[in-house]
Image (spheres, coloured by chain):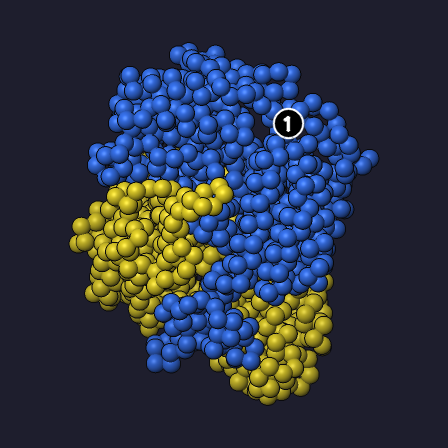
Chain colours: A blue, B yellow
Amino acid sequence: MWKGPAVAAPVWSVDPRTGKQREQVAVEATAQEVDAAVRAAHEVRGSLADRAVRAAFLRGAADALEAARDGLVETADAETALGPVRLTGELARTCYQLRAFADIVDEGAFLGVVIDHPDDTATPPVPDLRRYKVPLGVVAVYSASNFPFAFSVAGGDTASALAAGCPVVVKAHPDHPGLSELVVKVLRRAAREQGVPDAVVGLVHGFEAGLELIRHPLVAAAGFTGSVKGGRALFDAAAARPVPIPFHGELGSLNPVVVTEAAAAERAEAIGAGLAGSMTLGVGQFCVKPGLVLVPSGAAGDGLVKSLTDGVSDTDAGVLLDHRMRDNFLAGIAERTQLPDVESPVTPGAGGEHTVSAGFLTVPAGKLAGEGEHDVLLEECFGPVTVVARYDDDAEARAVLSRLPGNLTATVHLSTEEAEGRGRGPELLAELTPLAGRVLVNGWPTGVAVAPAQHHGGPYPATTSTSTSVGGTAIERWLRPVAYQNAPEALLPPELRDDNPLGLPRRFNGRLEH
Amino acid sequence: MWKGPAVAAPVWSVDPRTGKQREQVAVEATAQEVDAAVRAAHEVRGSLADRAVRAAFLRGAADALEAARDGLVETADAETALGPVRLTGELARTCYQLRAFADIVDEGAFLGVVIDHPDDTATPPVPDLRRYKVPLGVVAVYSASNFPFAFSVAGGDTASALAAGCPVVVKAHPDHPGLSELVVKVLRRAAREQGVPDAVVGLVHGFEAGLELIRHPLVAAAGFTGSVKGGRALFDAAAARPVPIPFHGELGSLNPVVVTEAAAAERAEAIGAGLAGSMTLGVGQFCVKPGLVLVPSGAAGDGLVKSLTDGVSDTDAGVLLDHRMRDNFLAGIAERTQLPDVESPVTPGAGGEHTVSAGFLTVPAGKLAGEGEHDVLLEECFGPVTVVARYDDDAEARAVLSRLPGNLTATVHLSTEEAEGRGRGPELLAELTPLAGRVLVNGWPTGVAVAPAQHHGGPYPATTSTSTSVGGTAIERWLRPVAYQNAPEALLPPELRDDNPLGLPRRFNGRLEH
C-alpha cells in the first residue's frame, strides 16, 4: 500500500497568466489522511437520512456560496484565468443546481417507490413487495479543471450525491486548489448550520491521494470529469477492486457537427460565425467544444469556411487553464498540421509566452473515411481549435461519422426545408443519435442547460456509464433499490406505507400515482 | 485472437441422474461463428424499433413456449433432473415474464420521457430539451444452470433486453444445451411470425465462445447469472475492453437469516420446519437459498435446531444439476465439517452414486465474529446445506452480520410484538438493509416473485451493478438516455412530441403526467 509522500508535498496555487506560484494552499493528503476523510464521511452518513435536512443543507449551501461570491470569483479567476464574468455566471449556475437538487429531494420521485400488494390467489402466491432506492454510501468526486465551480467541489456530482443522501469526499483539481479549499469551507459551514456534521464533505489534494480514494473499501461510487487517460485509469482501478464500484466518468468527446449542403447554401455566413464563437468560447476549453465539423465541398462550404476564418481571426489570444495544457495544445497542433492534405486557414498556436491563439484546420473528409495517419484528427484536442472536414457527398460524410467514438453531443445544421422534415433531416437525426447523448439541431453544443430533460453523457469515451452528470436524473447514479417483502407497516419506512404520508409519486399496484 | 476449436468440439446433453451422455446436440461456436451471430443480431436491430412489434413478439414467444410445453419440460427434466412439476411452474413463470415485459413495452414508462420547453427569459436562455431512452444494442446473455427456463434462453435477461429493443445473443449453459436449442428455435420462429428477422436471438455454446462474446466490439451490454468466479472473469473482461460495457451479473449470495430470541421463543418449531423446506428446495440449488442462519443460544434456539433436524432428516436425497456441482458440494462440505467447533446434526453428503443428501452445520457465532479459518462458512456453498450460527447476544449477531459481503436477500424472523414495531424489530430491519437487495420479514427468501416492486440484486457479489434482474425495472439495464435540443417537431420521434400521440407517462415542464 502506498503510504503517502515521505515529506508533506506542498500544493501550490498557480497563476496561469504568468505561470508563477501564488501561494501554498495545502499539502497533498497522505494515505492516512484519505482514510480518515473517507471514514469520517462514512461514520456520519446517517445524518443525511432525513430528506428535509438534505434539502435544507443544499439550499443553505447555495445561499452561502452566493454570499461568498466576490471572494470566490476572485480566487477562481486568479487560478484559472476564466474571467470574472464567466465565473460569476458559473457560480450562479452552481447555486441553481444545488437548489434544483433540493427541489428533487423534496419531490421524491427519484426514490422510485413501487408498492405491490400480495396476491394469495396467484400460483405461487405473490407476497407483499415494496421497493425504493437507498443511498450507496460515500461518493468520491473528482473535480474538473475547466469548471472550477459547476463541476468541482460544490458541482453537479457533489450536489446530486448529497441529494441522494451520500456523503462526499472530493479530490481537488490541481488547477484551482485555493478555490477548492474556500468552497469546501463554505459547504462544511452550511452543513453545520443545518446540524449536519461537516465530515459529510471531505477534500483531498494529490494525484496519489486520488488513486487511494478510488481504492478505499468504504468508497461506494465515484464521479469524474476529465481526460480519457486519467478517467480510464480510475475506471480501471474501480473495476479492479475486490468489490468493484460504479464509476461515472465523463472523459472525452469530439462533438461532431454536420452541415448539410442545403444549410450551407442557405446561411453559410451565420453558421461559420456561430462555429467560430462556439469553438473559441472559454478558449476552447469546454468538453462540448465542436471538434470536428463536416462541411460540404463547393462554393457554399467555401463561404462557411471564409466566415469561420473571419470569426476566428478576430478572436483574441487567451490563457489556458494551466501551462501543461498549453504544452499539450501546441504539441497537438504540431502533430495535426504536419499531416498531408491538412491546411490551416487560421493557424492555432502560441499567442504569447502564456497564451494561445485560436485557429482551425481543414482536411478532405475522404482522408478520415478509413483507418490511417489522419486518425489523430478524430481525437479531442483541448483548446481553441477545430477540424473542418470537407465532404463531397452524403456517403463520404456518413463514412466519417461511422468511424467516430462516442460523444457527449452531435449537432446538425439543416436548411429550413430539412428542418421541416423534408430531404435529409429525419435521416441525419437518426444517424447522429447512436453517436451521442445529446443531439442538437441548428445550434451549438457549448452551453449545457441544467434542466430535467438534460442529458450530459454519451457512449464511451464520452462517459463510462449510461447515466447523466447534468440535470435531475444525475441523482440516479448514487442509489440502489431495496425491496421489502412482507414487512409489517409498523416496520416500514414512511416512504413505503400504503397511506403515503409523505405524498410521494409512486407505482401502486401497477398504476402510476402522483 | 482465439480462433475457436481446431476440430469442432461436440456439445453433449448429459443426464445428471446417471452422469451419462444423452446425445450430441450442437458443437461449440468458433470465433467466426460468434462474430457471425453478433453481426447478424446487430444488423437487424432496427427491426425491434417499433414498440408494438416488440410487444407482439414477446407475447407470441410466450404463446409458442406454452404450446411447446410438454416437449420442453421433458427435455429440461432429462438435462437438469429438476422434475416436471417445478419445471412446468418455471416455464409458466417464464411466459408470465415475457407477457409482463410486453405490458411494460406498451405502457412506455421505461422510456423516461422528459420534455422541457425553452425559456428565453433565463440567463443564459434555456433551450428546448426532450429526452428519452434508446436501446444500447446487442446484449450478451449468459444462461444460468439452475433455471433452465426463467434465467436462460427465454428468461428475464432476454425478455427485458428484447423489451428494451435490443437483440440478444445467448451463451447456452452446458447443463441444458439440448433445451437451449429447442427454446431458441421457438423464439426465432415467434420472431419470424411477427415479421422480425430471427437473428434478433442468437445462441452459442462453449466456454471460449462466451469469452469471445463479451469481447466482441458490437456487444453493447451483458447479463449474467452464475458463480462468483465465472461472473467476475466476465465482468473483468467487460471492463478491460477498449470500449467497456455494462455487465449486469448476479454472482453469489449467502442470504443471511436472523431469528430473534423472542421469535424463537414464540415459534421455534415452525421456523425450523420452514428453514428445512427453504434450504432443501430444489436440492438447495437456488441463488436465494438461506446459507447462514443466526439462531439464539439457549432452549428456544435448541428447539429450532431440533425442528430443523427433523425436517432435513425427512428430506429425500436429490440429484444436483451436474456432477461437477456434486463434486464441489462434497468438497465444500468436507472443508467445512473439519473445522473446529463445527458440528453437523444432520451431515450433508453423498446420498448415492449420483445424488446428495441434505444436512446442516452448526457453529458458535463467536467463531464468525472475527477473521479466521471459519471464514469459509461465510461463503456460498451451492447445494442442500446451511450453516446455523448460535449467538449469545445481539452484539454477537451484529458482529457476524457486519462481516458479510453483499447479498440478494436478508431475512429476519421476529416475534409478534417485534413485528408490531416494538423491541428489536425496527433496528434489525435497518441493520439488514445495507446487506441486501431484498429484506424479508417472517418468510423465506426462496421464491422470487415477478412483480413491479421486485428487486433481485444487491451489493457485490450479489450483483455487479445497482440494477435488478427480476421485475419490471430490469428493462432499465439495456437503455441509455438521449436528449434532443431544439429539434423541430417534424423531426422528433412521436414519443417526444408535445401532443403525446402515444399517450406516454412523462415529465412535462417539470410536472409528472400520466
Q: Which residue is drawn at 29% across and 63% down?
A: B103
Q: Which quadrant of the figure contains the N terminus of chain A?
A: top right
Q: Which quadrant of the figure contains the C terminus of chain A?
A: bottom left
Element on which disc 1 rests: loop
Foreground of the two, A306 or A330: A306
Relative side of B479 to A160, left or right = left
In this rendering, the answer to whether B212 lies above or below A98 is above
Q: Residue B253, how many percent across, how many down?
A: 53, 62
Instruction: Identify the image quadrant of residue A170.
Output: top right
- Residue reaching furthest to the right: A7
Q: Is residue A279 visible?
A: yes
In this rendering, the answer to whether B215 lies above or below B196 is above
Q: Which chain carries label 1?
A: A
In this rendering, the answer to whether A97 lies above or below B422 is above
- Residue reaching furthest to the bottom: B266
Q: Residue B90, how many percent across, how many down?
A: 34, 67
Q: Which residue is drawn at 54% across and 27% down?
A: A283
Q: Which amino acid does label 1 sit on?
A: Asp
Q: Residue B507, how many percent across, how many down?
A: 39, 57
- Residue reaching furthest to the front: B121
Instruction: Identify the image quadrant of residue B295.
Output: bottom right
Q: Residue A384, how many percent across, how many down?
A: 51, 24
Relative side of B261 to A386, left or right = right
Q: Can residue A176 be seen in this view?
A: no
Q: Residue at x 53, y 85 (%)?
A: B270
Relative side of B142 to B228, left or right = left
| Residues packed near mark 1 inside 10 Å, few (<14), some (14 to 19) or many (20 plus) | many
Q: Residue at x 61, y 20 (%)?
A: A355
Name the residue that disc number 1 marks. A322
